[in-house]
Image (tube, coloured by chain):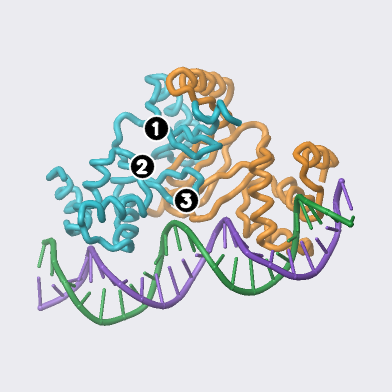
Chain colours: A cyan, B orange, C purple, D green
Amino acid sequence: MQEGWREVFRSFNKRVTPSRYAIVEVFEEKKKHLSAEEVYECLRAKKKKVGIATVYRNLDLFQRMGILRKVHFGDGKEHYEMVPQTPQHHHLICKRCGKVIDCENTGREEGEFFAHLKDDFAKRYRFSVESYHVYFYGLCAYCQNKS
Amino acid sequence: MQEGWREVFRSFNKRVTPSRYAIVEVFEEKKKHLSAEEVYECLRAKKKKVGIATVYRNLDLFQRMGILRKVHFGDGKEHYEMVPQTPQHHHLICKRCGKVIDCENTGREEGEFFAHLKDDFAKRYRFSVESYHVYFYGLCAYCQNKS
DNA sequence: ATAAGTGCAAAGGATTTGCGATGGG
DNA sequence: CCCATCGCAAATCCTTTGCACTTAT
């Protein structure tokens, strides 16, 4: 794990424990969205002894700290992914097989578009937008050829 | 319930039962996203005797039929809303109190923007987009003044 | 030293499932 | 009539919690 995390934890008055260390490391290595169970499995595979409850507690903590964000794919489990996953990306979810494809932002247009919406919502609803997620549903390449 | 639904059910070879009738009716009346439990409560309030399992089974069925779509607000429950809720709208979710505000589409720009992405994804990932959801996270008017 | 963090097992809450009973087509 | 659908209760799955033990600071 990069040393930087130690600082991040300190700034939130959170202790730097082996469990936390290990969990962040998993996300850094996998570079993808993971469910609590998946994180737990990765830890076991690395011989790290961390209880599943600790995984849940820390995923929630990291989310509140802004290190992770929740993503929902409709499979009944919460998934988490690292937040500064630069650049901002979206998710394509196959309605048939459930596969999730991470897709990159398509460019400047997007930033402008959402910046505009953000202002609009502040005016219309007095709601201050901090972040957004976009989910696209449809059929993946494979499933298009068999339904 | 509008008579039209009878046709819709027929076209899917699904029977028109009092339970289904009643569930669709609830969504037509409430005109908002509802969890299974909320649908169940609405039915009880209307003296309709429908088991909770039937509610779950039909919400899932309606989703597969394209009548309802799932929306996720991060509260651990699945919510459903009617699909052709014209016009397309998005959700503003307060990170602090969990309130969900339905917000209308902001206009033509949006259609163009997403149409462009749709083409792009078809080319890049051979993924055919059928629909999309956008979730905005931040603070609602009330919560901005107390965190 | 001491409060935060952890592991385990039990509790909780949402959703699904098995199965005999019911009723729509 | 017969099979899809239903109601009920039990089962399952994911997540949270209580509590005694451990450990980072």
Instruction: Find residue D15 and report its image quarter.
Output: bottom left
Q: Say which chain tag 1 marks.
A: A
The lab-note entry on whether marks 1 and 2 share a chain reads: yes
Element at label 3 = loop
Tell me: B65 left or right of D25: right
Instruction: For label 1, count other residues whose C-alpha is less than 10 Å away and answer few (under 14), some (14-19) or many (20+).
Output: some
For the point 67% across and 46% down, the residue is B61
Instruction: For label 3, count other residues whose C-alpha is less than 10 Å away and answer few (under 14), some (14-19) or many (20+).
Output: some
Mark closer to the chain start, 1 or 2: 2
Expressed as whole percent of the image width and height from the top left, the position of residue B41 reads 68, 62
Instruction: Find residue A82 and report its image quarter.
Output: top left
The amino acid sitting under disc 3 is Gly
The amino acid sitting under disc 1 is Asp
For the point 38% across and 49% down, the residue is A35
Expressed as whole percent of the image width and height from the top left, the position of residue B124 reads 43, 20
Which residue, given by chain and number where applicable, does mark 2 sit on? Answer: A33
For the point 32% across and 46% down, the residue is A68
Distance from disc 1 to disc 3, alpha carbons, whole Å, reads 20 Å
Which residue, given by chain and number where applicable, does mark 1 sit on? Answer: A102
Element at label 1 = strand
Which residue, given by chain and number where applicable, does mark 3 sit on? Answer: B74
Look at the image and tell me whether residue B26 can be seen.
Answer: yes
Distance from disc 2 to disc 3, alpha carbons, whole Å, reads 16 Å
Q: Please give the label number shown on residue B94.
A: none
For the point 19% across and 48% down, the residue is A8
Expressed as whole percent of the image width and height from the top left, the position of residue B119 reads 51, 18
